[in-house]
Amino acid sequence: MSDGEKSILQANINRDSVEDKAKDLSSWTKSFLKKHEYKRELEKHHIWRVVSFLSMLRHWFLILLTVFLNVFVLGIFQIPSYSCEFDPNVTVSGLLLIPRPWNCWSAYQYVILYFFGVIHFVLSFWMVVEYFVCEKPNFLYEVPLFKAVVNGIKNCIRNDIPLLSKKFKWIDTIKESEDSECFDIYLFSFSPIYRVLFLLFSLLSIGTFGYFYCLCLPYIFLNIDVMQDIVKAISRRSKQLFLMACFILSLLLIYAVLSFAIMSSFFNPGENNQFCTTLWECYITVIREGLLDGFGAISVTHVGQNGANFNIYLWRAVFDLIFFVVISTISLEVITAILVDTFSELRQEKDTAEKDQKSVCFVCGIDNDDFERRGKGFAKHYHCDHNIYSYMYFILHIKSMSPHDHNAIEKYVSDKFENDDIDFYPLHKAKVLGGLVLKKKDMKGMIDEMLMNT
Ligand SMILES: [Zn+2]
C-alpha cells in the first residue's frame, strides 16, 4: 500500500466507534482488494511494469518541464514590432488582437520550444493514460452536483408531497445513489477533468508556441494538501455554492429589471460604457458594475439632467445602499462564510483523526493509557500487535490463496470477512493486556450496578 493510499485511508475512515471502525476497515479492505487485483492484472503486461517503474521519474520530469517552459515563455514573449517579416498580430472576430511574439524569434528559440514542447506533450499523454488506466476500477460515472440535485428532488417529493409519491410508485423504486466510498473517484470531478485539460493545454501550447503553458502550472500543486483541501471544500459544498450563486444572479436580475424600468437614463454607454438599451445589456452592466463597484460607478445624475437634484440623489442613495447591503455585503459574505466553515470543518476532522490515532488503538479501541501502564507501550502495540495494515495484508494474503489451502484460522477470517461480520477483529481485547478490557464508561456502569445490588 502506498503512502498516498495510507493517508487517504487514515483521513477518511469512519472513527465514530470501535465497531464502526472495524466495519469501515472491512469496506476499505474490499476497495483495496479490488484495486490490488486490478493492479496485478495490469502488471502481467511487461510494458505496464516499465511504465509503473518510471512513473515517479515521469512525474518529476513533467513538473520540471512545465516550470522550465513557463520561465522560458516569460523571458521571450514580447509584443513584436512591425518591422518583423510577418504580420505581428492576428485579429479574431474584430474583437481581440492577439500578439504573435514568435514572428520575430530566432531559429534556436523555435527549436527549444518545439523540442521541449513535444516532450512535454508526450509526458502529459503518458500521465493521463497512466492515471485513467490505474484508476479505471475506482471511477464513479456520476456528476456529484447533478446527483445532489436529483437526490434533493427525490427526498422533497417523498417527504413533502407524499400524495405524488403514492400516485407515481416509480419514484420509490429509484435507488438512492450513495456517496463515494473508499478509493472511489468521481469521473466528473476536478482531478480527472483537470488531467484531460492539462493534455489539451500542452497540445494547444505547441500550436501557439507557449500561450497555454501557464494553465499547466496548477498540476504542480495537485497533490499538495492545501490544494486538495480547497478542492474538497468546494466539492463538499458545491450544492450550497451553486444555489447561492443562482440566488445572487436572481437578485441581480431583479435589480436589472428595476434599472431598466426606472433608471435606464442614468446609464450612459457613450461615456462610461454602461449599456442599458435592452434588458440583457442592463443585466450584464448591473452584474459587472454592481459586483465590482456596488453601483458607485453609475452616475447619480441622469442623461440630460440640469444641475444637482437632491430628490433624485435621495432615491438613488436608497437604491444603491440596499444593493450594497443585500448583495455586496450579505450575499457575497455568505459564500465566504460557507467556504471558511468548510475549511474549519476539514481542519477539525483532521485534528480529530490525529487525536484518535494518538490516543486510541484503531483495532481494539483500548486507550493509550492502558498500554502505557500495563502493556509494553502504546507505540509497540499500535505498530506491531494491532497494525491495521497487517489486518488488510492478511486478508489480501488469504484472498490470493485457493480456498482449499486455507487453514482453520484463514478459513474463519475469510468466511467472516465475506459475510461482513466483524467478530474476527479483537474489539476491546488485547493479548498483551491479558484479554478483554472494558471501556472506562462500561467499567463505571458495572461498578454502579454492583453498588446498587449490594
Ligand atoms: Zn489494539
Image (cartoon, grey):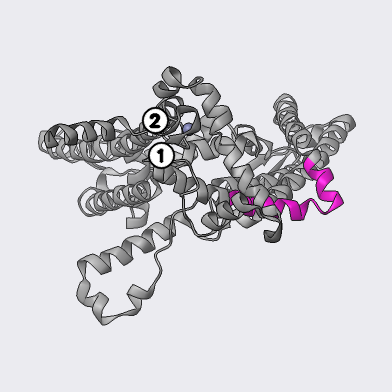
Q: Quadrant of residue 332?
A: top left
Between 386 and 227, the one lying in front of the other is 386
**x 42%, y 60%: residue:** 147
Residue that carries the numbered disc 1 in the rendered image: 15
Instruction: State the quadrant of the C terminus.
Output: top left
Q: Are marks 1 and 2 in contact (CB under 8 Å)?
A: yes
Sequence-wise, the earlier of marks 1 and 2 is 1
Q: Estimate how packed mark 1 is, as few (under 14), some (14 to 19) or many (20 or more) residues with alpha carbons within 10 Å.
A: some
The answer to whether residue 297 of the structure is visible from this angle is no
Between 252 and 35, the one lying in front of the other is 35
Residue 352's label in the rendered image is 2
Q: From the viewer's perspective, is the residue at label 1 or at label 2 nearer?
A: 1
Instruction: State the quadrant of the N terminus.
Output: top right
Three-letter code, disc 2: Thr
Magenta segment, prevailing SS (helix, strand or loop): helix
Q: Estimate how packed mark 2 is, as few (under 14), some (14 to 19) or many (20 or more) residues with alpha carbons within 10 Å.
A: some
Residue 229 screen position, x and y as percent: 48, 35
**x 48%, y 36%: residue:** 11
